[in-house]
Image (cartoon, rainbow, N blue to C red):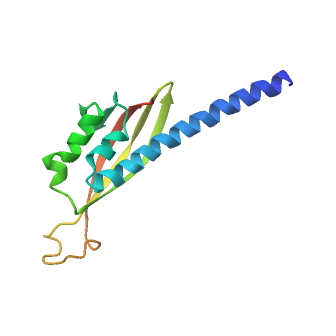
Amino acid sequence: MDRDVETRLDALARRVEALEDERAVVDVLTRYGFAVDSDDPERTGSLYAEGCTVEIDGDTSIRSRGDVAAMVRGRGHQSILPNCAHQMGPFSVRVDGDTATATGYGTVYLRTEEDWPGRTNRSLIFVICHLSFHSSLKQE
């Protein structure tokens, strides 16, 4: 094979791998939204590497799968179930070796009884809360 073609193919393979890595990170964050809204702490935690660091609004206390699961079980999250919907993104993802950093938004839609007293239709009114979300995910 021509050396120039081989060099170009190697560069293309690295670019495709980087795009696949970025896409995998976005997929994890999207699945996070579904798992956390389903009140599934184990599934939510399993999305992250054991050595992860999750930063939400400057709080970096989430540093493991167990911490992620504990956040789902926590009083704050439990207080908004089942009336919440997390919409994740957009995200800017940077991959550096075996570490990926995603920075973006999680928007939480929250239906409150105050908005529609006595209503049971959960699709009508939601309060929108924007959360700044930064996560470093160690790939395994």
Q: Residue 50 location in percent, x, y?
A: 34, 30
Image quadrant holding the C terminus, namely: top left
Image quadrant holding the N terminus, namely: top right
Q: Residue furthest top?
A: 3
Q: How many marks?
A: 0
Which quarter of the figure has residue 139?
Answer: top left
Q: Residue furthest bottom?
A: 118
Which quarter of the figure has residue 79?
Answer: bottom left
Q: Is residue 116 above or below residue 82?
A: below
Q: Residue at x 76, y 29 (%)?
A: 8
Q: Residue at x 35, y 54 (%)?
A: 34
Is residue 113 left or right of 59 when viewed as pictured?
Answer: left
Q: Residue furthest right?
A: 2
Which quarter of the figure has residue 45?
Answer: top left
Q: Is residue 89 visible?
A: no
Is residue 79 left or right of 54 when viewed as pictured?
Answer: left
Q: Residue 94 location in percent, x, y?
A: 48, 33
Q: Residue at x 29, y 72 (%)?
A: 123
- Which residue is at the front of the view, 40 or 133? 40
Q: Is residue 103 above or below residue 110?
A: above
Is residue 20 left or right of 102 when viewed as pictured?
Answer: right
Q: Residue at x 47, y 38 (%)?
A: 93
Q: Is residue 107 visible?
A: yes
- Which residue is at the front of the view, 39 or 123? 39
Q: Residue 54 location in percent, x, y?
A: 31, 35
Q: Residue 122 location in percent, x, y?
A: 25, 71
